[in-house]
Amino acid sequence: MAGRNFLFVPGPTNVPDRVLRSMVVAMEDHRSSKFPELTRALFADLKRVFQSQDGEVFIFPSTGTGAWEAALANTLSPGDHVLAARYGQFSHLWIDMMQRLGLEVQVIDVEWGEGAPEARIGEILGADRAQRIKGVMIVHNETATGVTSDIAAVRRAMDAAQHPALLYVDAVSSLGSLDFRMSEWQVDLAVTGSQKGLMLPAGLGIVCASPRALDAAKSAKCKRVFFDFADMRRTNPDGYFPYTPPLPLLYGLRTSLDILFEEGLEHVFARHRRLAAGVREAVAAWGLATCCRHPRWYSDTVTAVMVPPDVNGAHVIDVAFRRYNLALGAGLSKLAGKLFRIGHLGDLNELMLLGALGGTEMAMADVGIRIELGSGVAAAQDYWRRTDPVPKRRVARSEVVYASHSTGSINT
């Protein structure tokens, strides 16, 4: 199909051309004396993205799933009790992993479309007089439902209960796009992957561990080999890895971090907030609802759009892809067919999103959803024009520039 594929799933995300170019490198000796010039700065700069003052970063050749296994296996023992809320497909998958690792998981089932129930978490921890619960597991941004949980509120509930459990947070679809404050929120283990806000291909699983988490690792009994923090801690301080690292991805990570810092993390977060708000304006203009049940949980990286009950959301996705070369996210598990998802994170701007919204409108109309073509696009345009942070000014006649007469007079 002619033209570029419009990738608007909530991960993997678009990889900037600058990052792609940086990964086209010759292979090199990853044990040379020069190699630490690349790696040492990566560990330090990732801490800046996690907003962690005293954490330690581990980079595994893996994905977010591998990072989760590393976080769990290094800090817990079989039979340990943990508390986890299930409010989407990814929180469900992490619970499944915990159970398969031999942990005793107390599950709080929440309506999909809601966020982490901080009050309920506080009640359960307060009732745990023997302090058997060793960890509280929260998915910061649940991409299946377009919901972002309030990690600060979870921490307040834990503190109010005066409970020593470790706080584990999945930041896979939030880090590098949403404000994530590891030290301020006293997160003990945060995990992410390279293919979302870090704007890379999949292949890196990243963990940031607090001093409390590293202390817990000293007595943890879950088996680990490839994901052992101890092996990393023996080699990382000198800039090396216990096994062969994925060199192109590390060079790409260096460039993606440079891009984030050049824009400024606060500006990155503000851009995502503004772009997401425009998408929600479009959904409202279509007369449709999002899966997220309350504005306080709105995700700024993905919007899950509910389709009418007589329409299969998978049909919208298929038509968008086959006819318009637009990739949208599918409904997962119990939400399959009930919605489609528009990812809006990483390397993107207003015009890219307008293309996605326009293609989505055509696909919805093609499958029989009654919307006014252009209504969502217009609503997003209006919102983004009204909220543009760049000052506007009229161009005076005296500033009009004319091209050289040698190629014809062109008013620019």
Image (cartoon, grey):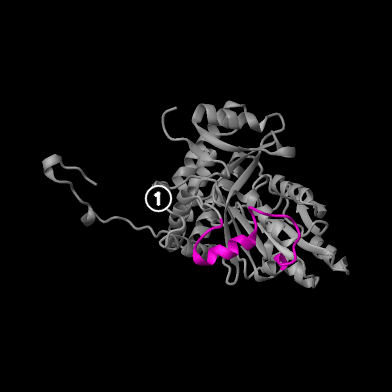
Amino acid carrying mark 1 in the image: Ser
**Percent of width and height locating residue 385:** 46, 51
Q: Secondary structure at mark 1?
A: helix
Give above or below for 348 relative to 175: above
Q: Position of residue 181 (x, y in %)?
A: 60, 66
Quadrant where the N terminus is found in the figure: top left
Front-lying residue, 265 or 212? 212
| Range covered by the magenta-colored residues | 216-242
Which residue is located at x 61 percent, y 44 percent? 284
Q: Visible in this render: residue 389?
A: no
- The residue at 60%/68% (across/down) is 55
Residue at the limit of the structure toward the left, as seen here: 406
- Let me know if residue 221 is in the magenta part: yes
User: Taking 383 as reference, is 9 above or below it?
Assistant: above
Quarter-of-image position of residue 180: bottom right
Q: Nearer the viewer, residue 244 or 407?
A: 244
> Any magenta on residue 240?
yes
The residue under the point 80% across, 61% down is 121
Residue at (14, 46) in percent of width and height = 404
- Could you tell me residue 51's position as x and y percent? 57, 66
Compared across the picture, whether 133 is left or right of 406 comes to right
Q: Position of residue 104 (x, y in %)?
A: 83, 55
Q: Is residue 207 visible?
A: yes
From the image, tell me which residue sits under label 1: 22
Graded by Cα atoms within 10 Å as few (under 14), some (14 to 19) or many (20 or more), the crowding at tag 1 reads some
Q: Nearer the viewer, residue 167 or 231?
A: 231
Q: How many marks?
A: 1
**138 relative position to 21: left or right:** right
